[in-house]
Image (cartoon, rainbow, N blue to C red):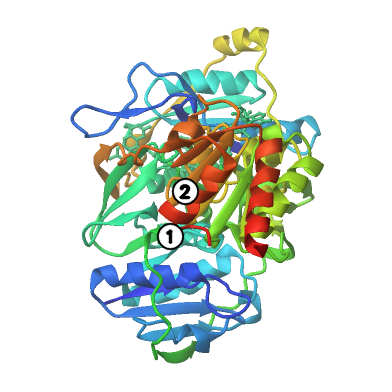
Amino acid sequence: MRIIVSIKRVVDHNVQVRPRSDGSDVDTSGVRMVINPFDENALEEAVRLRERGIASEVVVVSFGDATVQESLRQAIALGANRAIWGQAPAALDQLAVAKLLRHVAQREEASLVMLGKQAIDEDAGQTAQMLAALLDWPQAVAVSELAVDGDTLYVTREVDGGSESLEIRLPAVVSADLRLNAPRFVKLPDLMKAKRQTIETLDCAALGIDLSPRLQRARVETPPPRPAGQRVGSVAELIAKLRNDAQVIA
Amino acid sequence: MSVLVLADIAASGVALATRQAVSAAQHWGQPVDLLVLGGTDAAAHAQIAGVRRVLHADAPQLAQPVAEEVARLLNGLAGDYAVILAAHGSLARNALPRVAALRDVGMVSEAVGLLGPNSYQRPIYAGNLLATVDNRPGLQILTVRASRFEAAALDGQAECAAIAAPAADGRSRLTGQKTAGGERPELGSARVVVSGGRSLGSAERFHACLTPLADRLGAAIGATRAAVDSGYAPNEWQVGQTGTVVAPDLYIAVGLSGALQHTAGIKDSRVIVAINQDPEAPIMQLADYSLVADIFDAVPELVRHLQTEATA
Ligand SMILES: Cc1cc2nc3c(=O)[nH]c(=O)nc-3n(C[C@H](O)[C@H](O)[C@H](O)COP(=O)(O)OP(=O)(O)OC[C@H]3O[C@@H](n4cnc5c(N)ncnc54)[C@H](O)[C@@H]3O)c2cc1C
Ligand SMILES: Cc1cc2nc3c(=O)[nH]c(=O)nc-3n(C[C@H](O)[C@H](O)[C@H](O)COP(=O)(O)OP(=O)(O)OC[C@H]3O[C@@H](n4cnc5c(N)ncnc54)[C@H](O)[C@@H]3O)c2cc1C
């Protein structure tokens, strides 16, 4: 069984991003970029499946400009067998990414595609479901536990107010929740080795796929700040404020 | 053309988020239909003001539906609608992107503002930034942050129509469900939320400290990811970017620092209270009322005050 894992390169979660001065987009110049944390969970799970002999190969793929190759090398150092860089314009929307992933999944004859449940920059949480629909495969979104037995996938996924368990026939699409596992740390020698591995380049524009964005970003701004708060000196004062000023308790 | 709202599954009555989604749906100035699934009470949904028609798809596979079944049903209906919309809950998050892909259209997740017929505001980067996105004209598919919209009244009289559902596919099967349950209000729609962080130190202390306060205020209990990962609180209590987004009248943050990923989920709260021993913690800057104190002193004192005043 071959597993495809998609890797999105995103701004590190510790960075406080700002809009560009003209408000046209997010200013990501010079900030630290990392693998989307949820994609690390997806990758870790895929690598564990291979280590246990359930999967035969783990292929990572990322769409974007040349910088995504760095994230792909890191993914190789974390255990992926090979990597595909989908050379593409930055402004791919979720549907376009899903179409490109479908192409890769079909070409690679994958049985399982694993993604993050959301990317921490755009927070849309759509790509896995879109991909599953395009492939006409079943899906499991926000998965926190996963087991494979033959061509059946047993998963637990996080839903509002609890969790549900699903039994799913492969081939399938899975998106990872942070609770799926604790990703391993990359080791320096592995990273050095990964630097020498070739990454396949896929020219996305040459595939004859309609990648024109359905979504256009018109503006990015900082949300209006909440009004400044006040410090209270005691529990009694807090209760008085909540009761008399804010009127949120009886 | 008209607007189709996918109702949240409700064990009884109508989910608050469904009424809020119906309000959002009025934005287009077109008739609004409501799709209810499985055993959900269609007659109760017919009372939501501003709904023209309740479409009830009641098939065994839709009682606790998987995304595949919901998406196929919606895809069959999509041709009659200009907009398909739902609250940003697990059902819609799971199913609507599938529908969008089947229709070859884009989808907008968790809109907080509706600007034009195909223009939306939505938070990105854990709510640090607000993006305006234009979707291509044609079928609009979106989820909305329900708490940003007033709940529609319950004095309507929509007609009800039963509709057929496509046969079950069977490749994905729900085999179990686990809910936090209990007597507490639901986290996503509670009027008061009391949340604890890593500083609570253990599951026992988490409950000993926060439960009396939550009981006193009729509150839901929330937690940071650090508290959840340490095993102090169940997963479904996590509030934030990757947990539940809450918008209560009162949010009390107890011994948590206010990391961006956490505050992403609380910024719509009307009043935020923070109790922390560190005056510099980010949550103390965000809060409307901040108290510098040891939580193990302040919270019991808060409970005592609320108790004596209630009995006085
Ligand atoms: C006009 C426009 C301008 C944009 N400008 C920028 C920009 O300057 N910088 C920027 O970072 N984004 C930009 N974007 C957004 C970017 O293209 C989106 O991030 C993309 O559509 C995926 O959305 P998401 O991350 O919310 O997907 P989600 O559905 O939240 O992602 C889920 C999972 O999908 C997979 N995935 C998503 N994208 C990729 C990818 N490219 N390669 C591999 N796997 C992927 C990952 O596994 C991820 O965990 C722009 C979008 C538009 C429409
Ligand atoms: C991709 C990603 C997604 C994430 N999603 C989420 C999410 O959805 N929700 C979420 O919450 N987090 C999320 N996180 C984690 C987040 O970054 C923080 O690590 C987490 O919120 C910190 O939890 P905390 O405030 O409980 O702990 P800490 O940051 O350790 O804060 C503890 C606080 O308690 C105070 N304190 C200690 N003892 C006492 C005492 N006796 N009395 C009073 N105050 C005391 C300290 O001063 C400190 O401010 C995410 C992280 C990543 C990378």
- Identified at 45% across, 91% down, the residue is B160
Q: Secondary structure at mark 1?
A: helix
Q: Which percent across, then down, holds residue A201?
A: 44, 25
- Identified at 70% across, 45% down, the residue is B300
- Image quadrant where residue B229 sits: top right
Classify residue A89 as left or right of residue A130: left
Disc nearest the viewer among 2 and 1: 2
Classify residue B306 as left or right of residue B101: right
Q: Which percent across, then down, holds residue A71?
A: 51, 22
Instruction: Looking at the picture, tell me which residue is in the foreground, B287 or B22.
Output: B287
- Image quadrant where residue A15 sits: top left
For the C terminus of chain B, the image quarter is: bottom right
Q: Which percent across, then down, holds residue B279?
A: 52, 26
- Identified at 64% across, 25% down, the residue is A81
CA gap between label 2 and label 1 equals 25 Å
Classify residue A48 as left or right of residue B196: right
Q: Which residue is mark 2?
A: A241
Label 2 marks a residue whose chain is A
The amino acid type of the residue labelled 1 equals Ser
Q: Which residue is mark 1?
A: B147
The amino acid type of the residue labelled 2 equals Lys
Q: Which percent across, then down, holds residue B140?
A: 31, 62
How busy is the neighbourhood of tag 1: few (under 14 within 10 Å), some, or many (20 plus)? many
- Whether the residues at callouts 2 and 1 have beta carbons within 8 Å, the answer is no
- Image quadrant where residue B125 sits: top left
How busy is the neighbourhood of tag 2: few (under 14 within 10 Å), some, or many (20 plus)? some
Label 1 marks a residue whose chain is B
